[in-house]
Image (cartoon, helix red, strand yellow):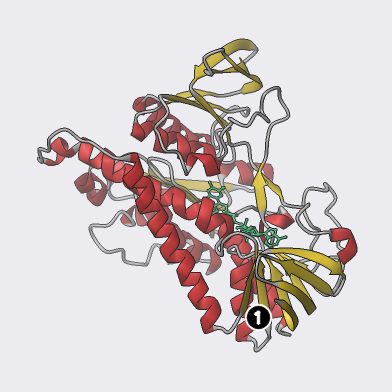
């Protein structure tokens, strides 16, 4: 069927950037169309944040059952079915994707499933089996996301090198797996496959895994990984991936100037994500790239070099996180709705679902050092927290950073159980501009892991009670 639409706002890409922008634009009374070639929810829901966390939850359950005796519970032999674990993950994803379809309906947002192409600077076309659509728009929001980056080394482009998407869809547990890249995605999968029984190697180019984090934070994760049997190679550069005759993979690495060969059944690439710059003809839209030519250039209103075209999410290559994409979507849609809104990147929370979890917001010690800020830190180990002891989850700590002069909290990191869910408390302390003294007035419920935040606050002045 031939169809033509005239809309106030057309959005290409139905990920956490695009669908959130669609809802906000519709809330402002705009006529909105959203075009998605795969499934609503984008990378985050279908191949990213949500399916990984569904797998992490299965692994948490598995690991807890394995140490059930420490809780005084005896179970027989512990077995699992990868198929059932994957099915559960798919159910979680499907529930959330249909939730988004429902939200599109509720807000009367037109949804077209197909690949959008640019006809000219005011018109898109979408063709699929049943529709041949032309869309004239007043404003366009580009939210086309990113894809796995591939290292430019021998063998990396071979079809059997796994991406994060492949790791989410495995039908058999590999006996061994070398993951190139010890960043967030690489480390999350390292713990997932380790729990499934795979012998995992992680190769990290930088001197430490989770390189953006402070050394003491990465150390907790490294220690936990090594205790679980994960091999970590840091300051290690992968230089080639070769296949043996039986299909076994050999990754050549150079670790601190020493050549090594890592042999494993499978190899996965987790060295970052690249903006999907080729999926729309940006030249026809008059949209320019940033200086490094690795993302669309945008101003703080999320506007591109073409005033009617906005870009949000991973395609801008600012910070590739789902909550950034969504927030940028709100900013873009607000501006289209005539409400001035600017994007600010000062307080970006990050959550890492390793075992244990890591969560961070504001400045860490590395940032404060590089910005020459005179700061004080307060640290509290979960070992000294009652709830963490009761849960048998005592790895990790809370660390807070305060400006020495103003005594305001400027950053915080939590490593340990419930870290990611506790983080917003620290965000709220920072955004409210609270000093150590003001923040320490809040009473935390007992027994909770969040009491560690209170103790870390007190410890900045050496006044902690339990440590
Ligand atoms: P995407 O979610 O990538 O969506 C873009 C959409 O655009 C895609 O669905 C694509 O099909 C569509 N599209 C592209 N071109 C066209 C076209 N021409 N026509 C129609 N449709 C098109 N972030 C977090 O914050 N927390 C996490 O825990 C987390 N875990 C992750 C785990 C993994 C394994 C991965 C890969 C990523 C993870 N991320 C996480 C990052 C997060 O998924 C992304 O930052 C987020 O999805 C970016 O949102 P987006 O809307 O910019 O793009």
Image quarter (top left, top right, bottom left or bottom right) of the C terminus? top left
Which residue is at 62% across, 83% downward? Answer: 26
- Relative to 23, does residue 361 appear above or below in the rendering? above
Q: Is residue 314 toward the left or the right of residue 457 in the image? A: right
Determine whether the residue tagged by mark 1 lies in a helix, strand or loop.
Answer: helix
Which residue is at 68% across, 42% downward? Answer: 370
Number of numbered tags placed on the structure image: 1
- Relative to 165, does residue 325 appear above or below in the rendering? below
Which residue is at 44% across, 58% downward? Answer: 93
- Relative to 9, does residue 295 appear above or below in the rendering? above
Q: How crowded is mark 1: few (under 14 residues within 10 Å), some or many (20 or more)?
A: many
Which residue is at 85% across, 68% downward? Answer: 119
* Residue 321 found in image quarter: bottom right
Image quarter (top left, top right, bottom left or bottom right) of the N terminus? bottom right
Ligand 1, seen in the image, is in the quarter at bottom right
Q: Is residue 437 visible?
A: no
- Residue, disc 1: 25
């Amino acid at each position: 069927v031939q169809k033509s639409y005239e809309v106030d706002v057309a959005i290409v890409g139905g990920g956490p950037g695009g669908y959130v922008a669609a809802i906000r634009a519709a809330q402002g009374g705009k006529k909105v169309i959203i075009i998605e070639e795969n499934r609503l929810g984008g990378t985050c829901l279908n191949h990213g944040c949500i399916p990984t966390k569904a797998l992490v939850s299965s692994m948490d359950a598995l690991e807890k059952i394995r140490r059930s005796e420490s809780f005084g519970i005896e179970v027989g032999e512990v077995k699992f079915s990868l198929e059932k674990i994957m099915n559960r993950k798919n159910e979680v994803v499907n529930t959330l994707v249909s939730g988004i379809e429902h939200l599109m309906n509720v807000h009367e947002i037109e949804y077209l499933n197909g690949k959008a192409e640019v006809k000219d600077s005011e018109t898109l076309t979408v063709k699929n089996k049943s529709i041949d659509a032309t869309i004239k728009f007043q404003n366009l929001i580009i939210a086309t996301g990113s894809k796995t980056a591939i290292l430019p080394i021998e063998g990396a482009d071979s079809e059997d090198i796994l991406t994060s998407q492949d790791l989410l869809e495995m039908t058999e547990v590999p006996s061994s797996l070398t993951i190139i890249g010890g960043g967030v995605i690489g480390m999350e999968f390292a713990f997932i496959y380790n729990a499934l029984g795979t012998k995992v190697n992680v190769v990290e180019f930088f001197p430490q895994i989770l390189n953006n984090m402070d050394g003491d934070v990465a150390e907790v994760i490294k220690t936990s990984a090594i205790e679980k049997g994960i091999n970590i190679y840091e300051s290690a550069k992968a230089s080639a991936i070769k296949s043996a005759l039986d299909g076994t993979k050999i990754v050549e690495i150079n670790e601190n100037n020493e050549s090594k060969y890592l042999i494993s059944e499978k190899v996965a690439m987790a060295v970052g994500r690249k903006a999907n710059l080729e999926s729309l003809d940006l030249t026809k839209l008059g949209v320019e790239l940033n200086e490094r030519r690795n993302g669309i250039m945008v101003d703080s209103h999320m506007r591109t070099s073409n005033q009617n075209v906005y870009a949000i999410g991973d395609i801008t290559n600012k910070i590739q996180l789902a909550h950034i994409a969504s927030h940028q979507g709100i900013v873009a849609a607000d501006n289209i709705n005539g409400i001035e809104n600017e994007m600010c990147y000062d307080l970006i929370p990050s959550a890492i679902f390793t075992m244990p979890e890591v969560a961070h917001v504001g400045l860490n010690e590395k940032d404060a050092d590089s910005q020459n800020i005179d700061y004080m830190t307060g640290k509290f180990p979960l070992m000294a927290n009652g709830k963490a002891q009761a849960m048998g989850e005592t790895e990790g700590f809370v660390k807070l950073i305060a400006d020495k002069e103003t005594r305001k909290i400027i950053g915080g990191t939590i490593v340990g159980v419930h870290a990611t869910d506790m983080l917003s408390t620290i965000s709220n302390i920072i955004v409210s501009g609270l000093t150590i003294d003001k923040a320490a007035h809040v009473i935390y419920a007992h027994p909770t892991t969040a009491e560690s935040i209170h103790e870390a606050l007190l410890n900045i002045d050496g006044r902690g009670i339990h440590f």
